[in-house]
Image (cartoon, rainbow, N blue to C red):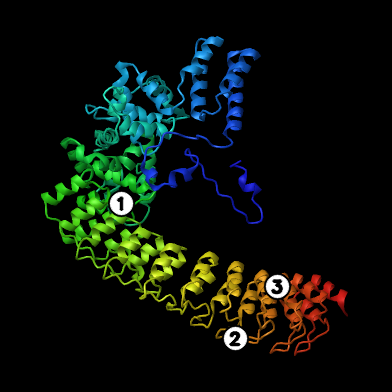
Amino acid sequence: MLTNSSQSIKGGSMVKFLITSRPFLHQSYANSQKVFQSQISIDEDQTGYTEDLQTFVQERINEISLNRQFSNDIRNFLCEAIISKADRTFLWIHMVLASIEKSLLTSRKEFQKIIASIPEGLAEIYHRYLTAIPLDHQEDASKLLKLLLACSRPLSLDELNIAFTMEPSYTTAESIMQNSHNSIAHTVQGILGSLVRVTGQQVSLVHQSVKDYLQDQFIVSIDSPPAIRMANPQGSALQLATVCIQYLLLDDFTVDFFPTNDSPTAAFADVFGELPLGDFEDDDLDSNTSFHDPAILHSETCDSLVSDFPFYTYASLHWAEHFARCEEDAPEELKDFAKSLLNPDTANCRNWLSFYHAKAPTPLDDDLMDQNPIILASQFDSYTVLKFLLLDCEPSQVIKNQSLYWASRLGHDRIVTALLQSGAEPNTRQLEGQTALTVASEHGNRSCVTALLADSRTNVNAPGRNGRTALSFACGGGHDDIVKELLNQKACNPDEPDNSGATPFFWAVGGGHHSILSTLARFRSVDINHQDKTGRTAVSWASGDGMADTLIRLIKLPRIDINAKDNKGRSPLSWAAGNGCTDVVEVLLANPKLDKTSIDNDNRNAISWACVRGHFQVLVRLLEAGCPGVDAEDIDGWTPLAWAIHTDSPDTVQTLISNENVLIERRDKGGRTALSWAVEYGHIEVVKVLLRAGADTGTQTGSGRTPAMIAKDFGRDDIVKELEVYGP
């Protein structure tokens, strides 16, 4: 269904699919407190499941019966026995089927025992599987579970193999591979059983509910299996962080893999830059490496690292986030290792940073190689490393300010607080002119905003990119909580315009953030009719952008002006009509305060603007509402019909000439008719519409040229034939 869905979409209708392992999301969000509670029950009491379960069971039993050569009698028995418990979950069904498929005993009695032995509740199922892990494999199970619990994405079998094998004594990738498991899939499934799923080359916990169960502190007791007691969130993060850090510090990565300013490749290029051009040639030189574009070299190096070192991608992209979650409990040795990975003076650091910059889904838009360890610690949320570095040396003000910017942008509130305490200036402008507060507000980092506002030096109205304040960014991003916190500051100006003249109210309207819009409108200091530098208001922008729902809310505000003209004299109705926003036009026309007669500085009305782009549906609404000026000339003498012909919109032309107030033979300032212009433009469909409406084929321009003559001059024999049908 998903793969073919695009072929079935017609008429501009769009379908959005939400795929989740958590059915009925509204149950989680109905009570905000429940959002933070562990939930391991799934698909309970949901309509439509019985039928799906039956289909699933029948198909799987047919497959198993075919492979095991079961009789029809046994096949029917299994289907009926399992379907009779159709109130159970898909996961329970999966467990039963997996047990039946693995069972070496295949009697009816044995199958009955299997079905009866698997408990109904998921917690009981998981506890049973964990308890069944042999004592001599409990430590291995704990290590595997920690890795699978902590990973930020499903691990590949190769990645899990390396992470599971990794020991502090291994100093090279080769030594790890020599001691790795020859069949990791067999090992994992043998130890953890049905708690894990191996799909292709990826391995993961069988379901999110397994993770919820293992992380639920209420299930941990003295009699819990060791695998449960040891697999807590902190311990899991520490396990994976340790593996990642140790891997990145292997001897294999103590030399630079990527070109640097001091690398042999760079030096090579400098040497040849001094040589005279001529017939110099040396077949021993590898031009493919000497003169490659740095971006190409980086890409090739990354590909080589991925190929030769299977765990390098995961370790580079995720080690910092895992370390940040457990660094307070990390041993001092691991903290020292983390410092080394955040020191650009080491090749290990330069290598993973270069790889990160090339492969991260959202790479940092600065030159990581030129960074200071303090900036790197701030970017990658390493609080303990930052505290050590701040105590170890006194960084420059520039370094502290840059670090504060990054911590604020990336949402690292602990880092923000530490840097402010060390003297970082919160109001300096960094990348794109952003301050720490404006960038934190833009990215929705509430905790960082709180930390910054707690510092008396922070200017809540300091401008950032394009002169926008923190409130402006929070309003544009729909960050309600940050908006409220900023507005609670006495010094906050809720109506501060940016470089374009747009206020926070504009940005809230533009983003369709209705709750923020209402919040701002309650402030007397907020001018809801404020005009930006082009003279447009929030109503004008909402109208022109087709935001009907937002406009409905704006119109309800006291003192709102729905007719305010911009610097060119255009009204909100004009903008909505010109942009073809039919829904908005209907909303405006339904308001008794609307000025339907409004014209702009070029004497153009809403009808004229609807015709210029061929929005005939808007035109129909305007005419039905009695808007005047259907045949009015603008400052250049162009009527709505002239605009419709120019844009080649037969439907719009037909709608206009069907109106009794439109004169089809009206001549413009040059003495030409609508038909004359349609022929010259070569718009044959418009020509047909005009001819069917009775347009005179014999009218002449001021120079005596008829439509047929014009068509012949342009070589349009098809139009000539149409003209001949309706006249000489």
Q: Which residue is mark 2?
A: 603
Nearer to the camera, 263 or 205: 205
Residue 275 visible, this orientation = no
| Residue count near mark 1 (Cα–Cα under 10 Å), binned few <14, some 14–19, many ≥20 | few
Q: Which residue is mark 3?
A: 652
Q: Amino acid at mark 3?
A: Thr
- Horizontal side of 668 relative to 355 (left or right) equals right
Precedes in sequence: disc 2 or disc 3: 2
Task: From this view, report whether residue 566 is shown above or below residue 368.
Answer: below
Residue 522 location, x and y as percent? 39, 70
Q: Which residue is mark 1?
A: 269
Question: Which quadrant is home to the C terminus?
Answer: bottom right
Q: Residue at x 63, y 17 (%)?
A: 76
Residue 367 location, x and y as percent? 29, 54
Task: Find out whether the residues at labels 3 and 1 contact each other: C-beta distance under 8 Å.
Answer: no
Task: Find out whether the residues at labels 2 and 3 contact each other: C-beta distance under 8 Å.
Answer: no
